[in-house]
């Protein structure tokens, strides 16, 4: 006659392959769900090892396999504490939670003791997925999702090996040392989050119209839809170009010329790109016939704009200075460019 432990192990062995398939399904779902909303470090998972399961059955005296909620376990590692809540909200929306068995181990009943752990959610697939043929075989199969930050994860892994499962009794002063480390990491977690918030706020300020034009703000401008669209309009003129090349050095090179001309803010640059949009297209079309390159450098519009602005000031030397950033022109090249630019400025109206 089978013992209760043997019976549960037999039942689990029969379902072990299904849990492996479920792991793949849930891992893929989590990756897709989090991708658009949360920047995370890692998602991993494991189906419980039979030997580990036997130990747990003996300790907890389970009667049925359904009582064991972590036969499949997945872990989501985030970068910041507030991302844990974002992940939790997504999981609550997309899966069915067993609220009676969910545990928030970040909460510590003893305020005098440092606690540092993760959020444990027990879930099953949502009915909207279980109704689909590819998911219906996983009906009733529970799994655990642990969510923690990368610093929580580092501490938990070390603590698990040296305190939770020690080879010998851990002295109280060593345990206290681990608690102190946990407290320091908790502070570090929050400080990293604050640092991120400050950086993101600074980034928002930099992208404002009155932000100074510099090597940082030009890189951000290059990702704006209007700038991307302008560059796409210029690329067909490079008939030999089979690829694009984007380097921050190229963007910053011609930004320095624009700054010398007097473009001081990112807002001014946006306005000049709009005002001279038609002129940039016309001059680019004219010059493209001389371009042998098999690649298109993202940011070419900045080089064109700098030449246009110098020509508006009737500065042939300025036009030559911009061109020399790309190659060494002969005098006739500079003269031709300058004359073409002056004609385009007369013939092509400004955009407003």
Image (cartoon, grey):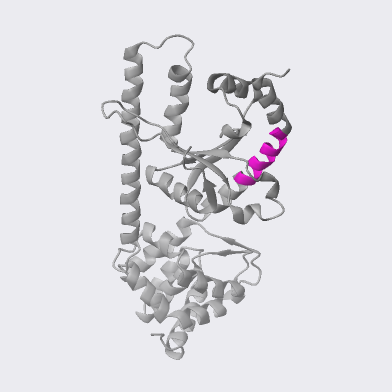
| Residue 202, percent from left and from top | 31, 55
- Specify the segment rendered in magenta: 15-26
Q: Is residue 290 positioned above or below 14 on the image?
A: below
Total count of labels: 0
State the quadrant of the C terminus. bottom left
Q: Which residue is drawn at the image coordinates 63% and 43% (left, top)?
A: 140
Work out which residue is located at the far front of the displayed protein and give it.
1
Visible in this render: residue 310?
Answer: no
State the quadrant of the N terminus. top right
Q: Which residue is drawn at the image coordinates 62% and 31% (left, top)?
A: 65
Work out which residue is located at the far bottom of the displayed protein and give it.
347
Q: Is residue 347 positioned above or below 67 on the image?
A: below
| Residue 307, percent from left and from top | 43, 74
Q: What predominant SS class does the magenta segment belong to?
A: helix
| Residue 23, percent from left and from top | 63, 40
Q: Nearer the viewer, residue 288 or 10?
A: 10
Q: Which residue is drawn at the image coordinates 47% and 83% (left, top)?
A: 278
Res. 3 image quadrant: top right
Res. 239 image quadrant: bottom right
Work out which residue is located at the far left of the displayed protein and give it.
112
Q: Nearer the viewer, residue 204 or 4?
A: 4
Q: Is residue 231 positioned above or below 204 on the image?
A: below
Confirm whether the magenta stretch covers residue 106.
Answer: no
């Amino acid at each position: 006659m089978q013992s209760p432990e043997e019976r549960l192990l037999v039942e689990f062995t029969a379902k072990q392959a299904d849990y492996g398939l479920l792991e793949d399904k849930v891992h893929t779902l989590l990756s897709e769900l989090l991708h658009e909303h949360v920047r995370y470090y890692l998602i991993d998972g494991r189906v419980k090892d039979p030997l580990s399961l036997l130990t747990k059955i003996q300790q907890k005296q389970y009667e049925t396999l359904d009582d064991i909620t972590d036969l499949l376990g997945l872990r989501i590692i985030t970068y910041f504490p507030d991302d844990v809540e974002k992940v939790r909200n997504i999981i609550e929306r997309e899966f069915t939670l067993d609220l009676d068995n969910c545990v928030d181990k970040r909460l510590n009943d003893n305020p005098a003791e440092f606690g540092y752990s993760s959020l444990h959610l027990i879930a099953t697939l949502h009915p909207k997925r279980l109704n689909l043929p590819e998911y219906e075989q996983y009906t009733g199969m529970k799994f655990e999702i642990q969510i923690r930050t990368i610093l929580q994860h580092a501490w938990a892994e070390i603590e698990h090996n040296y305190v939770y499962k020690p080879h010998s009794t851990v002295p109280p002063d060593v345990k206290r040392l681990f608690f102190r480390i946990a407290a320091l990491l908790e502070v570090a977690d929050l400080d990293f989050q604050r640092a991120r918030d400050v950086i993101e706020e600074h980034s928002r300020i930099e992208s404002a119209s009155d932000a100074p034009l510099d090597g940082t703000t030009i890189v951000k401008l290059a990702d704006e839809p209007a700038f991307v669209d302008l560059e796409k309009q210029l690329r067909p003129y490079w008939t030999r170009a089979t690829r694009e090349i984007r380097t921050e050095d190229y963007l910053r090179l011609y930004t320095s010329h624009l700054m010398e001309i007097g473009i001081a803010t990112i807002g001014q640059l946006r306005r000049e790109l709009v005002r001279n949009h038609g002129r940039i297209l016309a001059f680019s079309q004219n010059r493209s016939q001389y371009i042998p390159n098999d690649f298109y450098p993202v940011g070419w519009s900045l080089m064109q704009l700098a030449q246009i602005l110098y020509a508006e000031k009737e500065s042939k030397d300025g036009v030559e200075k911009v061109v020399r950033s790309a190659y060494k022109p002969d005098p006739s090249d500079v003269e031709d460019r300058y004359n073409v630019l002056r004609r385009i400025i007369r013939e092509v109206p400004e955009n407003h």
